[in-house]
Image: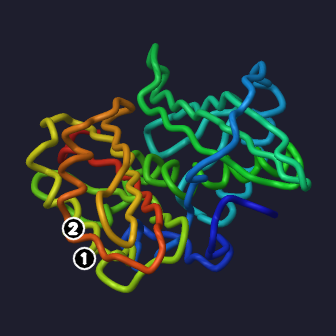
Amino acid sequence: MTTVFDEMVHPSRCKAPTRRQAGGFSRAVVAGILASMAILQRVDAEPLSLEAALASKLGQFSEQSPGLFSVTNGLIVLGDHQLKVMPTLEKEVEMGDKRHTAAVRFEVIVDGRDRPDFSLGTVGLGPDKAEARDAAITEWYWGFGISIFRAFSGLDPALVVRDYAVHPGYMGVRGDRPAGWMDGSEAMNRKLLEHIFPVLATLDVIALDLKLTVPPAGALDGECRVNGRVSVGLTDRLKQLDWPRGNSPYMFKQAYVLVKKKKL
């Protein structure tokens, strides 16, 4: 399968989570997104075919992570919670040379609420439309979906920062990752979160989507979202960290779900 990842640890090589060790992210899984693309043409969403592809992939992910979740009548079952994942194909393009891209937005509804609780978009790349969509689903799950599932499953968090249980997604990097603290470890997550906490509002559940492009020299660029909304303050704060520099630009991508203690 072709994806937008520069490198990827295949899910079959990742240990299944247990109640005690779930959320441990000592190994970085590289899952970047396209830094730049051709102009994409908007197409009508194809919810049935896309939902079928998502259902198939979630079945595979459930087998790879036994005990984390199950799928019943199209709903993700996590302990006392039920989640509905709704994918929408927003943009799709054939780029030539048997390369296709698919931009997919995933919205997650928790316990039958009347509006989505989480929303995040990803871009998949593949030799055909089906593979591109499959890649987008895979990136969403390992980068963000798994952090949502762990947050609502009752599993122990990867770490606790201040008053929040922290459930990270797998770290993604597009480009060559330079040496330094940016390694997907617990220490990295703690360093990053402690740095940005002063600009975060106090909410019961906080979903963070962090993207930052780091050049060899000069100004950094990026976009950060809090619960689906762009946050200029958070982006500016993130840029202030002592990011490792390499010989070429790279894009850093990391998602978190933070849950205030005893709120789920």
Q: CA distance from mark 2 to mark 1?
A: 5 Å
Residue found at the very far top of the displayed protein: 114
Which secondary structure lies at badge 2?
helix
Q: Are marks 2 and 1 in contact (CB under 8 Å)?
A: yes
Relative horizontal placement of residue 43, taking residue 160 as reference (left or right): right
Q: In percent of the image, x 60 and y 53: which residue is there?
A: 34
Tag shown at residue 190: 2
Answer above or below: position of 60 versus 19: above
Percent of width and height locating residue 136: 67, 48
For disc 1, the marked residue is: 187
Q: Quadrant of residue 152?
A: top left
Q: In percent of the image, x 73 and y 41: which residue is there?
A: 102
Percent of width and height locating residue 6: 63, 70
Which secondary structure lies at badge 1?
helix
Q: Is residue 211 visible?
A: yes
Relative horizontal placement of residue 73, taking residue 122 as reference (left or right): right
